[in-house]
Amino acid sequence: MRSSNPVFSRRGFGQGGQAGFNTGPQAQAGNPYAQGAPAANPYANSPYANNPYAQPQQGAPGYAPPTAPQTDRMTMDDVVSRTGLTLGVVVASAAVAWMFNLPLVIAIVAALVAMGLAFWQSFKQEPSPGIILSYAVFEGVFLGAMSNFVNKFAPGAAMQAVLGTMAVFLAVLFLYKTRIIRVNRRFTQFAIAAGIGYALLSLVNLGFALFGAGDGMGFRTGTVGILMGIAGVCIGALFLALDFKSVEDGIAYGAPKKQAWFAAFGLTVTLAWIYFEFLRLAWILNSD
């Protein structure tokens, strides 16, 4: 199985078998992934059909005799608790940055540190709670300081960004749970391509701005800035669906409990991105 979330695709969700796990998804009443009912697998004939946590069959290379049943599996409660903790750290550090009225220079430094930590964790094969929570601290400082700065020129922008982020999260969750959004290979490829394209345009615009072109290519102000902000929110929503898919796959295939930290990390990164895009949109709309 190859995870649909790029954050997960570099580790167990897209790699070979691992001893100590069942050869198929966990059997549960009404579970379409249950053993003995392969025809009901909605991911048959797709890159999600193989369990990356499966133990090799008897007689196959790498087979080990079964041991005690594995109970250290990721559950939805694990994902919710770790995501709540990570987002709580983001909110708490953002509140501190807001209250102490931290200058923009600190916000920029915090953003660079958070980016470095995010890349570090993304390329690690194992989740590191320390790195993830440190990322949450610096990301919160960045968002809190930026929110305070924007709110001075566009009162209410921070609250509008919070409400917008919550609305997108609930909307994507509803569309995903009702299968109106179906995360498959084509969906994943489109989301990743859109995300890469958006990131490149943003970097080009930043480069022009840093070398004295004012607002760069105009991607951050006016009508073009509004369109770019809407595009950023939409692409962030696509990545949110990829996060939901990764969580669902991990639980269905009996991923280790520690993978819940990856789920928390992916959701936090995506929600922070969506919030920042809404904050910038609120600034543009309220300052016109």
Image: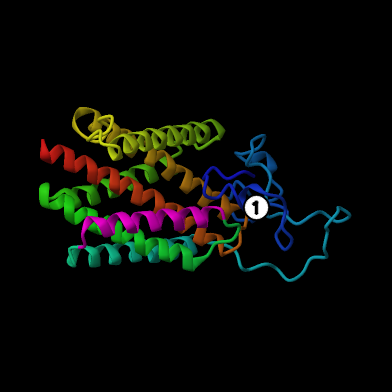
Q: Determine the main secondary structure of the stretch shown in magenta.
A: helix
- Above or below, 77 against 218 in this view is below
Work out which quarter of the rendered image holds the N terminus and state it.
top right
| Residue 127 lies in quadrant | bottom right
| 130 horizontally vs 69: left or right | left
Q: Point out the stretch of residues depicted in magenta.
A: 102-123
Which is nearer the eye, 104 or 52? Answer: 104
Which one is in front, 139 or 15? 139
* Residue that extends furthest to the bottom in the rendered view of this protein: 68
Can residue 119 be found in the magenta stretch?
A: yes
Residue underneath mark 1 = 25
Tag 1's secondary structure? loop
In percent of width and height, residue 112 lies at 38, 54
Whole-percent x and y of residue 107?
A: 28, 57
The residue type indicated by label 1 comes to Pro
Observer-nearest of 250 and 201 = 201
**In the picture shown, does residue 72 fall above or below 176?**
below
Is residue 159 among what the camera can see?
Answer: no
Where residue 65 sits, quadrant-wise, is bottom right
| Left or right relative to 185: residue 98 | left
